[in-house]
Image (cartoon, rainbow, N blue to C red):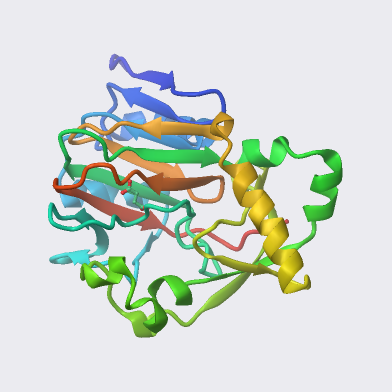
Amino acid sequence: MSDKIIVNRLAGSIGAEIIGADVKNEHHWPIIRKAFIDFSVISIREQNITPDDHLTFAKRWGEINVNRFFNSLESYPNIAIVLKEADQTAAIGEDWHTDHSYDTKPAMCSILHAIDLPPYGGDTCFSSQYAAYDALSNKMKKMLDGQYAWHSSRHAFGETAKSDAQHKTGNFKNANKATQDALHPVVITHPLSGKKALYVNPDFTTHLEGFKPSESKAILSFLYSHCQNADFQCRIKWKKGDVTMWDNRATWHKAINDYQGYRRYMHRITVEGCTVNP
Ligand code: SIN
């Protein structure tokens, strides 16, 4: 293969950008796949792709998970729209979270394509949940290993969330489908890498199984503050056309909402995962 593909590591714990690759080229797939497993977040720069190309690339990873709460692209029910109009103030995904942790088989990855960007800002930050787990003391690891936590979509996308700023933008639908909760291990063994990762997040985890509410709150609050340590993070600065994908079972992410008065428009495809085990 004569194409020169460069994989640039972005930070010590997580993230790489890939330059010179084309998501449409099947010969580039092994390099992209390896970088994804090694770095958990990859930004494949300057892609010239249609929604069909985006879908074909996503299908290489697995079956598509149709997001039931996000608006979708016309004629493409499996491509979710991540949009903030210039006159809107709330941004989708502006708090730390892991996509689809409320599903019983949580999503493997999300693949975001930048269509229209603000003149500055609108980056996405990621945090490695491998690094977060590794940095805990052995005593804390021992306490958390074998514990389970509940995750839910109800408070984020359900009827009770309808008064939230985000819902008022009209970006979400199907509040009546936010009925499911899921129980997952607090520490999972990643299905691809075999490494251990923390698997709780501030948006969708509601409580720890078997703990008193005050205990669950205190432990989760410690973990959330621990996981936000800058040492575990990388930050993706977008350019139009970039395709960034992240491993939902090894990372948290957060859309930085610092571009008031400008439009940001992305297409997102989420790929099905599997049951997550301790
Ligand atoms: C998301 O949370 O899926 C969106 C991330 C972003 O818009 O940067």
The quarter of the rendered structure image containing the N terminus is top left
In terms of depth relative to the viewer, which is nearer, 41 or 26?
41
Residue 181 x, y percent position in the rendering: 55, 76
- Residue 277 in the image: x percent, y percent? 69, 58
Q: Where 184 sits versus 97, above or below?
A: below
The picture places residue 89, in percent across and down from the top left corner, at: 23, 56
- Residue 90: x %, y % from top left: 28, 58
Position of the C terminus by quadrant: bottom right
Residue drawn at the location 31% of the way across and 80% of the way down: 174
Q: How many numbered marks have been drawn onto this rendered protein structure?
A: 0
On the rendered structure, is 89 left or right of 163?
left
Q: Is residue 189 visible?
A: no
Q: In the image, is 266 to the left or to the right of 106?
A: left
Q: Quadrant of residue 275?
A: bottom right
262 or 179, which is in the foreground? 262
**Image: 104 above or below 134:** below
In-front residue for pair 37/84: 84
Q: Residue at x 15, y 55 (%)?
A: 85
Compared across the picture, whether 118 is left or right of 2 comes to: left
Q: Quadrant of residue 93?
A: bottom left
- 25 and 259: which one is in front? 259
